Amino acid sequence: MIKKIGIIGILILLIPGCVTINIYFPAAAAEKAADKIIDEVWQLKPGEEPPVQPANAPTK
Amino acid sequence: MKKLITVFSLLIATLLSSNWVSAAANLDVNTPAITAIKNSMQARHNQLNPHYNTGAVGFTADGLVAVRDATAVPLKDRGGINSLVAAENSDRSALYKEIAAGNGHPEWAGEIRSTFAGRWVDKAQSGWYYQNAGTWVKK
Protein backbone atom coordinates (compact mmCIF):
# COMPACT_ATOMS: atom_id res chain seq x y z
CA MET A 1 0.00 0.00 0.00
CA ILE A 2 2.77 2.42 0.92
CA LYS A 3 4.51 1.49 -2.31
CA LYS A 4 1.33 2.24 -4.28
CA ILE A 5 0.95 5.63 -2.61
CA GLY A 6 4.57 6.31 -3.44
CA ILE A 7 3.99 5.50 -7.11
CA ILE A 8 0.91 7.68 -7.23
CA GLY A 9 2.84 10.47 -5.56
CA ILE A 10 5.51 10.25 -8.22
CA LEU A 11 2.81 10.30 -10.92
CA ILE A 12 1.30 13.44 -9.42
CA LEU A 13 4.67 15.12 -9.63
CA LEU A 14 5.60 13.81 -13.07
CA ILE A 15 2.42 14.16 -15.10
CA PRO A 16 2.01 17.94 -14.74
CA GLY A 17 5.74 18.17 -15.36
CA CYS A 18 5.34 16.51 -18.76
CA VAL A 19 2.35 18.61 -19.67
CA THR A 20 4.13 21.78 -18.61
CA ILE A 21 7.19 20.99 -20.70
CA ASN A 22 5.11 20.19 -23.77
CA ILE A 23 3.15 23.44 -23.76
CA TYR A 24 5.71 25.49 -21.95
CA PHE A 25 6.12 28.30 -24.45
CA PRO A 26 2.90 30.37 -24.75
CA ALA A 27 2.89 30.56 -28.54
CA ALA A 28 -0.45 32.37 -28.83
CA ALA A 29 0.58 34.99 -26.29
CA ALA A 30 3.89 35.44 -28.10
CA GLU A 31 2.09 36.05 -31.41
CA LYS A 32 -0.16 38.58 -29.76
CA ALA A 33 2.84 40.33 -28.23
CA ALA A 34 4.67 40.30 -31.58
CA ASP A 35 1.66 41.77 -33.39
CA LYS A 36 1.34 44.52 -30.83
CA ILE A 37 4.98 45.50 -31.09
CA ILE A 38 5.09 45.30 -34.89
CA ASP A 39 1.97 47.46 -35.15
CA GLU A 40 3.68 50.07 -33.00
CA VAL A 41 7.05 49.95 -34.71
CA TRP A 42 5.48 50.14 -38.18
CA GLN A 43 2.68 52.41 -36.94
CA LEU A 44 -0.07 50.21 -38.29
CA LYS A 45 -3.59 50.13 -37.06
CA PRO A 46 -4.01 46.86 -35.14
CA GLY A 47 -4.54 43.91 -37.46
CA GLU A 48 -3.78 45.82 -40.63
CA GLU A 49 -1.13 45.47 -43.26
CA PRO A 50 0.73 48.65 -44.03
CA PRO A 51 -0.98 50.69 -46.72
CA VAL A 52 0.63 50.51 -50.14
CA GLN A 53 2.48 53.76 -50.29
CA PRO A 54 1.61 56.11 -53.12
CA ALA A 55 4.51 57.83 -54.85
CA ASN A 56 4.88 60.48 -52.20
CA ALA A 57 8.63 60.57 -51.90
CA PRO A 58 9.59 63.29 -49.45
CA THR A 59 10.23 66.51 -51.26
CA LYS A 60 13.59 67.95 -50.50
CA MET B 1 -10.08 1.31 -4.97
CA LYS B 2 -6.82 1.33 -6.86
CA LYS B 3 -8.59 2.65 -9.92
CA LEU B 4 -10.26 5.34 -7.85
CA ILE B 5 -6.94 6.54 -6.46
CA THR B 6 -5.41 6.61 -9.93
CA VAL B 7 -8.28 8.64 -11.35
CA PHE B 8 -8.13 11.01 -8.42
CA SER B 9 -4.40 11.53 -8.77
CA LEU B 10 -4.75 12.19 -12.50
CA LEU B 11 -7.43 14.75 -11.76
CA ILE B 12 -5.18 16.58 -9.33
CA ALA B 13 -2.33 16.40 -11.77
CA THR B 14 -4.45 17.94 -14.51
CA LEU B 15 -5.64 20.71 -12.25
CA LEU B 16 -2.10 21.53 -11.19
CA SER B 17 -0.77 21.60 -14.70
CA SER B 18 -3.61 23.71 -16.09
CA ASN B 19 -2.95 26.23 -13.33
CA TRP B 20 0.69 26.51 -14.31
CA VAL B 21 -0.20 26.86 -17.95
CA SER B 22 -2.70 29.66 -17.45
CA ALA B 23 -0.15 31.54 -15.37
CA ALA B 24 1.85 32.01 -18.57
CA ALA B 25 -1.06 33.03 -20.83
CA ASN B 26 0.11 36.57 -21.42
CA LEU B 27 3.44 38.18 -22.17
CA ASP B 28 4.29 41.55 -20.74
CA VAL B 29 5.70 43.84 -23.41
CA ASN B 30 5.64 47.08 -21.45
CA THR B 31 8.86 46.93 -19.46
CA PRO B 32 11.00 50.08 -19.72
CA ALA B 33 13.68 48.19 -21.66
CA ILE B 34 11.19 46.92 -24.24
CA THR B 35 9.59 50.34 -24.62
CA ALA B 36 12.99 51.95 -25.22
CA ILE B 37 13.89 49.42 -27.93
CA LYS B 38 10.48 49.79 -29.53
CA ASN B 39 10.84 53.57 -29.71
CA SER B 40 14.28 53.26 -31.23
CA MET B 41 12.98 50.86 -33.90
CA GLN B 42 9.97 53.06 -34.59
CA ALA B 43 12.25 56.04 -35.20
CA ARG B 44 14.47 53.98 -37.51
CA HIS B 45 11.55 52.66 -39.55
CA ASN B 46 11.31 55.87 -41.57
CA GLN B 47 14.83 55.23 -42.82
CA LEU B 48 14.32 51.52 -43.45
CA ASN B 49 10.91 51.77 -45.10
CA PRO B 50 12.18 53.02 -48.51
CA HIS B 51 14.72 50.19 -48.59
CA TYR B 52 11.99 47.62 -47.95
CA ASN B 53 10.05 49.19 -50.83
CA THR B 54 12.95 48.95 -53.29
CA GLY B 55 13.91 45.45 -52.15
CA ALA B 56 17.33 46.63 -51.00
CA VAL B 57 16.62 45.26 -47.54
CA GLY B 58 14.58 42.18 -46.71
CA PHE B 59 13.53 40.04 -43.78
CA THR B 60 15.52 36.99 -42.77
CA ALA B 61 14.07 33.74 -41.46
CA ASP B 62 15.57 34.41 -38.04
CA GLY B 63 13.67 37.59 -37.32
CA LEU B 64 16.31 40.05 -38.52
CA VAL B 65 16.81 42.18 -41.62
CA ALA B 66 19.58 41.91 -44.20
CA VAL B 67 20.85 43.81 -47.21
CA ARG B 68 19.45 41.93 -50.18
CA ASP B 69 20.52 44.14 -53.05
CA ALA B 70 22.89 47.00 -52.28
CA THR B 71 22.62 48.28 -55.86
CA ALA B 72 18.98 49.16 -55.13
CA VAL B 73 20.18 51.66 -52.53
CA PRO B 74 20.60 55.22 -53.80
CA LEU B 75 24.30 56.08 -53.97
CA LYS B 76 24.05 58.70 -51.27
CA ASP B 77 22.65 56.14 -48.81
CA ARG B 78 24.84 53.22 -49.80
CA GLY B 79 27.57 53.91 -47.27
CA GLY B 80 25.11 53.95 -44.39
CA ILE B 81 23.01 50.95 -45.29
CA ASN B 82 25.14 48.39 -43.46
CA SER B 83 25.20 50.35 -40.23
CA LEU B 84 21.46 50.99 -40.51
CA VAL B 85 20.82 47.25 -40.87
CA ALA B 86 23.27 46.44 -38.06
CA ALA B 87 21.59 48.92 -35.72
CA GLU B 88 18.16 47.47 -36.54
CA ASN B 89 19.40 43.93 -35.95
CA SER B 90 20.97 44.75 -32.63
CA ASP B 91 17.66 46.31 -31.51
CA ARG B 92 15.73 43.30 -32.77
CA SER B 93 17.97 40.79 -30.97
CA ALA B 94 17.79 42.87 -27.80
CA LEU B 95 14.00 43.05 -28.13
CA TYR B 96 13.62 39.26 -28.31
CA LYS B 97 15.91 38.83 -25.33
CA GLU B 98 14.14 41.49 -23.30
CA ILE B 99 10.68 40.04 -23.92
CA ALA B 100 11.93 36.65 -22.76
CA ALA B 101 13.78 38.03 -19.75
CA GLY B 102 11.03 40.49 -18.85
CA ASN B 103 8.65 37.57 -18.53
CA GLY B 104 11.00 35.55 -16.38
CA HIS B 105 11.99 33.06 -19.09
CA PRO B 106 15.27 34.04 -20.78
CA GLU B 107 15.25 30.62 -22.47
CA TRP B 108 12.23 31.69 -24.55
CA ALA B 109 14.28 34.18 -26.57
CA GLY B 110 14.76 31.76 -29.47
CA GLU B 111 11.07 30.92 -29.73
CA ILE B 112 10.11 34.57 -29.44
CA ARG B 113 12.55 35.31 -32.24
CA SER B 114 10.97 32.73 -34.53
CA THR B 115 7.47 33.93 -33.64
CA PHE B 116 8.51 37.44 -34.62
CA ALA B 117 10.17 36.19 -37.81
CA GLY B 118 6.81 34.88 -38.98
CA ARG B 119 4.84 37.93 -37.91
CA TRP B 120 7.18 40.48 -39.56
CA VAL B 121 6.67 38.67 -42.85
CA ASP B 122 2.90 38.28 -42.36
CA LYS B 123 2.55 41.99 -41.71
CA ALA B 124 4.99 43.06 -44.42
CA GLN B 125 3.67 45.05 -47.34
CA SER B 126 3.33 43.22 -50.62
CA GLY B 127 6.40 43.78 -52.73
CA TRP B 128 8.74 43.50 -49.77
CA TYR B 129 11.27 40.68 -49.73
CA TYR B 130 11.75 37.92 -47.18
CA GLN B 131 13.96 34.88 -46.94
CA ASN B 132 12.43 31.46 -47.23
CA ALA B 133 14.61 28.34 -47.14
CA GLY B 134 17.65 30.42 -48.01
CA THR B 135 16.22 32.26 -51.02
CA TRP B 136 14.67 35.69 -51.31
CA VAL B 137 10.97 35.74 -52.03
CA LYS B 138 8.94 38.78 -53.05
CA LYS B 139 5.74 39.03 -51.06
Image (spheres, coloured by chain):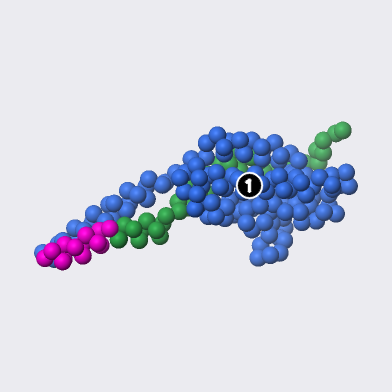
Q: Amino acid at mark 1?
A: Arg
* Location of residue A54 (image quadrant): top right
Q: Position of residue B136 (x, y in %)?
A: 72, 61
Q: Quadrant of the C terminus of chain B?
A: bottom right
Quick one: label 1, few (<14), some, or many (20+) residues within 10 Å?
many
Across the whole image, how many numbered discs are drawn on residues? 1
Q: Quadrant of the N terminus of chain B?
A: bottom left
User: Of helix, strand and loop, which one carries label 1?
Assistant: helix
Main secondary structure along the magenta-highlighted residues: helix
Name the residue that disc number 1 marks: B92
Residue in the image at 45% along x and 45% along y: B104
**Residue drawn 64% across the image and 58% down it:** B61
Quadrant of residue A22 within the rendered picture: bottom left
Image vertical order of residue B6 relative to residue B102, above or below: below
Visual hue assigned to chain B:
blue
Residue placed most toward the observer, B8 or A44: B8
Task: Please state if B49 lies on the left or on the right of B76 as rendered.
Answer: left
Image-based side of B71 in relation to B107, left or right: right
Q: Which residues are magenta?
A: A1-13
Res. B3 visible in picture: no
Q: Chain of mark 1?
A: B
The green chain is: A
Magenta stretch: includes residue B84: no
